[in-house]
């Protein structure tokens, strides 16, 4: 590949200095302007690399030797970090991760959203950024000597058998290992995805950080689970705090974890946990934030940006099981939540009753369809809150927001790139982005959440 006067060739070695990180955590070096992306490299490091792939506008390389380490280089504490695909930034100090994530948000707002002079605050990180995930869903495989349970190796479907994960709650590690041993004892065979045989596909554990309640979910290919009653007896005897044991049946040849059928084998259908003052019922299939400590930080910021006095009508698009909705309801006159997943709305209604919150109303459907109908019914939102999936807001919803003209919009985002794109559309539609607050929900990974505050410009 020729770039100007320089020919970049595959399998060639180069000495480079890294300037930046990509959105997936690879180091970026340039050879006469031609960018090369190299995993495990960090900004300000000098190194030897081997070019392994050459494309028209960029290439990929492999880190061979570091001549000069960057200021944020640390030894990754996890023994399987280099093989496992779960984390991408353990080789970077936590301080460095915070700097990189703030920079990433700032850059995409400028580059994609063409938003200049937007205040992007330093990332709100964790005091103890380990052992934060309250849900583990771990694939299982048959190995010589028994069952293996762990996460997939990078860019493969090879399972790395592991006893512990440094970003999982310790309790979940204990649960997964205990359930693995029990299933192994009673001859349960792991699912073989190539031949579509075997029984046990995944072990899932949920842990209520505040309540200490535990849910175990066995995800199986078949409805039949060998020695089911003995397995249940041993799980209840060996795992302190278990409140629910469920089986999800997924007979399809697919990478999707869950099937359509879930049955409670023992105990309750739900476990409970709290985020702040709000209590949530969590089922096997419920979407519930995996880092509740930082979720509270995120939602407190969303509540601050909503600037509620108790007189406002608020619409929460993409409301899920009502997590943000119920937070907003504490300070609003009335909150309307909309979500496309019927089961999530059932959970949201249940959570409202659980907390004695009666100034909320939930509807199933697409936000861009439901909200205009609410408008026709005379419902006017003073504040609209959106918390969309990674792909961002549907364009029809953005147009609905622009037409509805709420005083404020609070945009909660798990993808800075789609946030930047959508902020540009809302800015062009008469809103002004005041500030953006990144929140580190997933330490040691490349992901960063943001909350953006927008206000309606005068004259609109």
Image: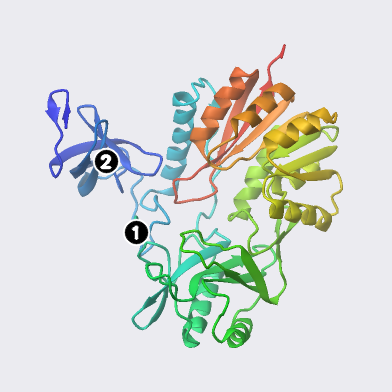
Instruction: Judge from the rendering whether residue 405 lies leftward or rightward of residue 389; answer left or right.
Output: right
Q: Which residue is mark 1?
A: 156
Relative to 269, residue 422 above or below: above
Instruction: Judge from the rendering whether residue 378 lies leftward or rightward of residue 363; answer left or right.
Output: right
Q: Which mark is residue 45?
A: 2
Q: Position of residue 258 (x, y in %)?
A: 56, 62
The answer to whether residue 244 is seen in the rendering is no
Task: Name the residue rendered at 37%, 67% in the picture.
Answer: 194
* In this view, the mark in front (1 or 2): 1
Residue at mark 1 to residue at mark 2: CA–CA distance: 28 Å
Task: Name the residue rendered at 79%, 53% in the picture.
Answer: 349
Q: Which mark is residue 139?
A: none
Q: Position of residue 74 (x, y in %)?
A: 34, 52
Q: Dot 2, how many residues are within 10 Å of its Cα: few (below 14), some (14-19), or many (20+)?
A: many
- Mark 1 / mark 2, whichever is N-terminal: 2
Q: Please identify the quarter of the rendering in which residue 219 is found.
A: bottom right
């Amino acid at each position: 590949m020729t770039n100007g006067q320089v020919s970049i060739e595959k399998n060639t070695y180069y000495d480079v200095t890294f300037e930046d990180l990509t959105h997936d955590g690879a180091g970026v070096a340039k050879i006469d302007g031609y960018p090369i992306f190299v995993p495990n490299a960090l900004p300000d490091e000098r190194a030897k690399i081997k070019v392994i792939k050459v494309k028209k506008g960029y290439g990929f390389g492999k880190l061979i030797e570091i001549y000069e380490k960057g200021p944020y280089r640390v030894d990754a504490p996890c023994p399987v970090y280099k093989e496992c695909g779960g984390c991408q930034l353990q080789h970077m100090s936590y301080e460095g991760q915070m700097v990189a994530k703030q920079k990433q948000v700032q850059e995409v707002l400028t580059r994609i959203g063409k938003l200049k002079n937007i205040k992007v605050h330093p990332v709100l990180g964790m005091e103890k950024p380990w052992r934060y995930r309250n849900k583990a869903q771990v694939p299982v495989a048959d190995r010589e000597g028994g069952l293996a349970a762990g996460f997939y190796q990078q860019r493969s479907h090879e399972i790395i058998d592991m006893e512990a994960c440094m970003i999982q709650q310790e309790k979940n590690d204990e649960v997964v290992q205990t359930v693995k041993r029990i299933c192994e004892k009673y001859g349960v065979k792991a699912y073989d995805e190539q031949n579509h045989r075997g029984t046990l596909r995944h072990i899932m554990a949920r842990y209520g950080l505040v309540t200490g309640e535990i849910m175990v979910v066995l995800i199986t290919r078949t409805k039949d689970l060998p020695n089911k009653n003995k397995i249940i007896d041993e799980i209840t005897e060996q795992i302190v705090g278990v409140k629910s044991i469920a089986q999800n049946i997924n007979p399809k040849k697919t990478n999707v974890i869950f099937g359509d059928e879930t049955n409670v084998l023992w105990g309750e259908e739900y476990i409970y946990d709290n985020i702040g003052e709000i209590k949530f019922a969590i089922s096997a299939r419920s979407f519930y934030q995996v880092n509740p400590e930082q979720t509270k930080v995120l939602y407190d910021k969303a509540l601050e940006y909503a600037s509620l006095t108790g007189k406002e009508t608020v619409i929460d698009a993409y409301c899920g099981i009502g997590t943000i909705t119920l937070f907003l309801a504490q300070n609003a006159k009335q909150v309307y939540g909309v979500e496309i997943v019927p089961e999530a709305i059932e959970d949201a209604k249940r959570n409202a009753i659980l907390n004695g919150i009666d100034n909320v109303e939930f509807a199933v459907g697409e936000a861009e369809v439901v909200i205009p109908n609410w408008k026709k019914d005379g419902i006017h939102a003073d504040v609209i809150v959106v918390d969309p999936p990674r792909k961002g807001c549907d364009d029809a919803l953005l147009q609905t927001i622009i037409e509805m003209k709420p005083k404020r919009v609070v945009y909660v985002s798990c993808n800075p790139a789609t946030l930047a794109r959508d902020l540009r559309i809302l800015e062009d539609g008469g809103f002004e982005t005041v500030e953006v607050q990144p929140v580190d929900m997933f330490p040691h990974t490349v992901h960063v959440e943001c909350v953006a505050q927008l206000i309606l410009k005068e004259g609109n």
